[in-house]
């Protein structure tokens, strides 16, 4: 299914909230979804790296990088680690780098943009907290759905098997 969100909103409009930002899509998975794990960090991707090195179990990491366009919170090595650890996707309110390589990986990635410079590593940030992204509060254990149309969240897993 290439256009998941339009079908989800047709079927489950009351259960979904659209995360209205200008997302760019990266990676080979243009459609991805899963249970949410959250991290909040500013120009320090230490927690992102740690989380994506742990078992993902098909979940999606949502990173609030405070919208910074000054450093990249994800690069190719961490993205490869996410695949190795079975993460379904990564959504970053911030930047990524190594885009040409990430676009060859079987991973779904959404970000606000790109930046060639990596972050500092001070082990700062918070994990599994509520994030306010756009007008939406995203909490751990929610479910997130992403495709080329955007990003949406739900408090419960939605049945996508019978969508057209």
Image: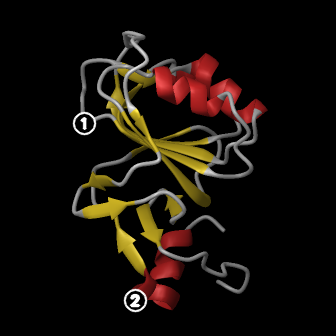
Q: Count the marks: how many?
A: 2
Q: Is residue 111 visible?
A: yes
Q: Is residue 19 visible?
A: no
Q: Position of residue 155 (x, y in %)?
A: 48, 74
Q: Secondary structure at mark 1?
A: loop
Q: Residue at x 55, y 22 (%)?
A: 100
Q: Residue at x 66, y 78 (%)?
A: 160
**Mark 1 — residue?**
67
Q: Is residue 71 above or below residue 41?
A: above
Q: Which quadrant of the structure image shows residue 158? A: bottom right
Find residue 14 and name its label.
Answer: 2
Q: Secondary structure at mark 2?
A: helix
Q: Position of residue 44 (x, y in %)?
A: 37, 19
Q: Is residue 127 above or below residue 1?
A: above
Find residue 162 and name its label.
Answer: none
Relative horizontal placement of residue 152, taking residue 161 as reference (left or right): left
Q: Which quadrant of the structure image shows residue 51? A: top right
CA separation in Å, label 1 and label 2: 28 Å
Q: Residues within 10 Å of mark 1 (few under 14, many from 20)?
A: some
Q: Position of residue 53 (x, y in %)?
A: 67, 27
Q: Position of residue 57 (x, y in %)?
A: 74, 49
Q: Residue at x 23, y 56 (%)?
A: 134
Frontmost residue, 28 versus 8 = 8
Q: Residues within 10 Å of mark 2 (few under 14, many from 20)?
A: few
């Amino acid at each position: 299914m290439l256009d998941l969100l339009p079908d989800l909103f047709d079927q489950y409009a009351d259960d979904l909230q659209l995360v209205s930002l200008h997302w760019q899509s990266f990676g080979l998975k243009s459609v991805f979804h899963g249970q949410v794990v959250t991290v909040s960090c500013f120009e320090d991707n230490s927690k992102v790296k740690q989380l994506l090195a742990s078992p993902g179990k098909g979940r999606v990491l949502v990173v609030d990088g405070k919208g910074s366009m000054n450093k990249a919170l994800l690069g190719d090595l961490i993205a490869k680690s996410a695949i190795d650890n079975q993460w379904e996707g990564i959504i970053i309110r911030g930047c990524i780098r190594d885009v040409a390589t990430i676009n060859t990986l079987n991973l779904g990635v959404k970000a606000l943009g790109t930046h060639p410079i990596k972050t500092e590593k001070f082990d700062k940030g918070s994990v599994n907290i509520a994030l306010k992204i756009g007008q939406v509060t995203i909490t751990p254990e929610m479910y997130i759905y992403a495709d080329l149309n955007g990003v949406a969240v739900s408090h419960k897993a939605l049945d996508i098997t019978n969508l057209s």
